[in-house]
Image (spheres, rainbow, N blue to C red):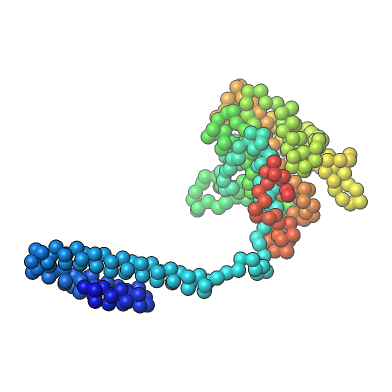
Amino acid sequence: MDDLRNKYIDLIAGASDEGALEDLRVQAVGKKGEISLKMRELGKMTPEERQTAGPALNALKDEINAALAAKKAGLADAALNERLKGEWLDVTLPTRAMRQGTIHPISQVTEEITAIFADMGFAVAEGPQIDTDWYNFDALNIPGHHPARAEMDTFYMHRAEGDDRPPHVLRTHTSPVQIRYMEKHGAPCRIIAPGRVYRADYDQTHTPMFNQVEGLAIDKDISMANLKWVLEEFFSAFFEIDGIKTRFRASHFPFTEPSAEVDIQCSWVDGQLKIGEGDGWLEVLGSGMVHPKVLAAAGVDPNEWQGFAFGMGIDRIAMLKYGIPDLRAFFDSDLRWLRHYGFASLDVPTLHGGLSR
Ligand code: PHE
């Protein structure tokens, strides 16, 4: 039994890989292995012989199994160490000259706007960019014959031959989200709806696709005064300048009554535009008290509820804040421009952490 033991302990110690180890296991303690066969011989022994040989054989089997397991673990460790040596990596080496992606200024500004309005209790809503003319026009008190439809330079979708229903449109503003939101959630509500809008127009200050953010606040007693406070609060936070003044000019939109266009204070010094100082004014948005017909179209009782809405060009205020001179550059996908005006991807704008740092 000692010979058997020494033989296998030596062989196991010398095994060079897991395959050789497995062969040894079969040879020693497998079904027809040397030690297993010896155990079968126990039956032919006298009870006295068996009393000593039995436990000894069992102990031997355990010892061989333990040696096999230990060797197997040792081989695995050695293999891992070998691999680690081969795949060793100096993490202190400088990275390769790799360009990091950046956040587009429109995405950045949308996040900034969202952070500011979220702080004032506005949720973010979304609507489809392809919408029916009912949501884009009729429900907003712009009936079929209304001149505003022509003014909007609307993109109409094709209908299949013989389909007489009015065509879908690429939404010309984010205002249809007002209807969709109130229809679904009723009043009171307080939302902003940022997103893409489309108009057939192209020059230095117009692109056929651009971005707006809609604001909507409906409750029992919301007034123009609330609108003015919210907007001034917004502009001060957005431009990071305390006490920006706004100017409300009477205007007309079919979906608000009364309506106002809103300007922010600015100055032109040596051809440079400065926000929040001086005696110039820059138009930045349209707004007003939501028209009773619009509330009714969305299933909200105008005798019970009232509130304000506004629509603001995101691209416009992004250009103002970050000194971007040409609107068209936003959508050119020019890498040099994107690297220059883009934002670090991990700097998420928050009110407490800073909006644009
Ligand atoms: N939808 C208007 C536009 O695109 C803006 C607006 C929204 C005006 C809400 C008043 C109220 O010009």
In this rendering, position of residue 254 left or right of residue 69: right
Q: Nearer the viewer, residue 76 or 329?
A: 76
Q: Nearer the viewer, residue 286 or 126?
A: 126
Q: Toward which corner of the image does residue 141 lie, by quadrant?
A: top right
Q: Toward which corner of the image does residue 50 lie, by quadrant?
A: bottom left
Q: Give the answer, above or below, for where 218 lies relative to 47.
A: above
Residue placed at 32% from the left, 69% from the top? 68
Q: Nearer the viewer, residue 63 or 123?
A: 63
Work out which quarter of the rendered image holds the N terminus and state it: bottom left
- Residue 303 on image: x %, y %: 61, 21
- Residue 13 on image: x %, y %: 35, 75
Residue placed at 60% from the left, 37% from the top? 123
- Residue 74 on image: x %, y %: 40, 69
Instruction: Pick out the residue farthest to the right.
Output: 270
- In this orientation, does residue 306 appear? yes
Residue placed at 71% from the left, 60% from the top? 338
- In this orientation, does residue 146 appear? no
In this rendering, position of residue 183 left or right of residue 323: left
- Residue 124 on image: x %, y %: 60, 40
Q: Nearer the viewer, residue 214 or 240?
A: 240
Residue placed at 19% from the left, 63% from the top? 55
Count numbered badges in the picture.
Answer: 0
